[in-house]
Image (cartoon, helix red, strand yellow):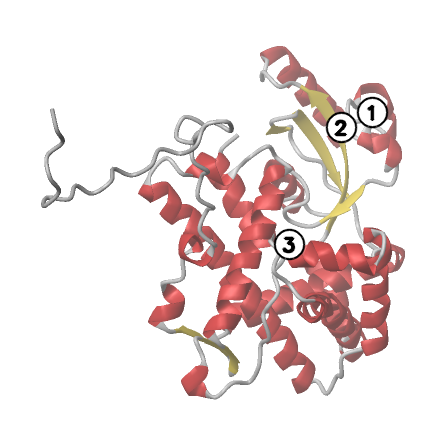
Amino acid sequence: MNYKKTLAALALTAVLTLTGCSQSPAKDAAVTIDGVAFTQADYEGAFLYSKSMMDMQLAMYGVTPEMFWNGEEGKAQYNQQIAESTKQQLTLLAVLENQMKEDGLKLDEAKLDELMAQQDTQMGGAELLDELLGQMKMTREQFRRMVSMDVMAQQLQTHYAEKDPDAVRKFFDEEFLHCKHILIQDAEGTAEKEALAKEIAEQAKNGADFDELIAQHNEDPGMEANPDGYIFTEGEMVQPFYEGTKALEVNAVSDPVRSDFGWHIILRLPMDDEDYTAMQGRVQSLYLNQLLTDWMDSAEVTMTPEAEAVNFETLLPPAPEEPASEEDAPAEDQPAPEEDAPVEEDAPAAEK
């Protein structure tokens, strides 16, 4: 595993919260994103929580931060990943809040209460959740603000689906693909398997029933659970498969396409209203994600030198001092040695 790449990917998905974001006066702002100001304390709290969540995510893969601490350069890279994650999540929060205001939407407090209650239940009670939050240096109000991001995203998703349904449908038609395929497994890339794939592709192009060819030759077990084929967008399939499908006209069959799994013979299929209806919720979510990405990319972010200089080592509490070793401690039944008594220079010499 490439640990640095894993860390970079997880940094993008690390969830974080704030110590109390506000529309602070510009003179108090350490970070300002499209008019939403965050104090130095806001940023430092977000930074530390981002580190905590990133470390938890890494632990799921058996990775510890110390794996990057082979020197000062490793620490700097690790710190930079935390900083980038913090900046991205602050940007997302600012974008969500600003967009809610722009579209005249108010946060659904009832839904937020419901999600908070679910969090209590999942943790085994409010006290246990509060204990966990305390370990992460979070208050319940800070955690509530984190959860509100999910509520705002859902509200905006519904809002834009109703506001411009044609745009959502256009997004589906332009970004999604539909196909069936025949996989000939061939991790080594042998000439024998390639020849078989070419023969099957030629049969399909000459009019052979594609479903019958699937039944005879396919080695992708996923096709059994998806007899009508796959509907997907970029990033959901291996890239050669995605590109091979996209390059086809509807109802056309590909030449064998090579991926790490083997050889794919692809039949691109049309998409209809039933396909869109079946996937409408997912399409709406991805459409909003695209909008959020565009808004975040265009957001204006400014940071003070103090915010830029934040480092996880300076924010974390110092490690406790180690207790004295047993060798240095006096035995239980032996008093500690007394200090030497001062010598009285004027005292008379003892008689011999």
Viewer-side residue, 319 vs 45: 319
Residue 261, quarter of picture: top right
Say what secondary structure mark 2 lies in. Answer: strand
Q: Secondary structure at mark 3?
A: helix
Q: Position of residue 280 (x, y in %)?
A: 83, 61
Residue 133 image point, x, y percent: 68, 58
Which of pointers 3 and 1 lies earlier in the amino acid sequence? Answer: 3
**In the rendered image of this protein, does residue 82 appear above or below residue 326?**
below
Q: Where does the C terminus fall, quadrant-wise?
A: top left
From the image, state whether disc 3 or disc 1 is nearer to you. Answer: 3
Q: CA distance from mark 1 to mark 2?
A: 8 Å
Q: Check if mark 1's residue and mark 2's residue have beta carbons within 8 Å.
A: yes
- Pointer 2: what residue? 182
Residue at 57 percent across and 64 percent down: it is 89
Residue on which disc 3 sits = 135
* Residue type for callout 1: Leu
Mark 3 neighbour class, 10 Å CA radius: few under 14, some 14 to 19, many 20 or more: few
Label 2 crowd bin: few (<14), some (14–19), many (20+), radius 10 Å = many
Farthest top residue in view: 192
Picture layout, residue 232 above or below residue 167: above
Q: CA distance from mark 3 to mark 1?
A: 58 Å
On residue 213, the disc is: 1
Q: Is residue 183 above or below residue 91?
A: above
Residue 172 visible in the displayed image: no
Q: Quadrant of residue 102?
A: bottom right
Q: Amino acid at mark 2?
A: Ile
The image quarter in which residue 327 lies: top left
- Left or right: residue 273 versus residue 194 is right
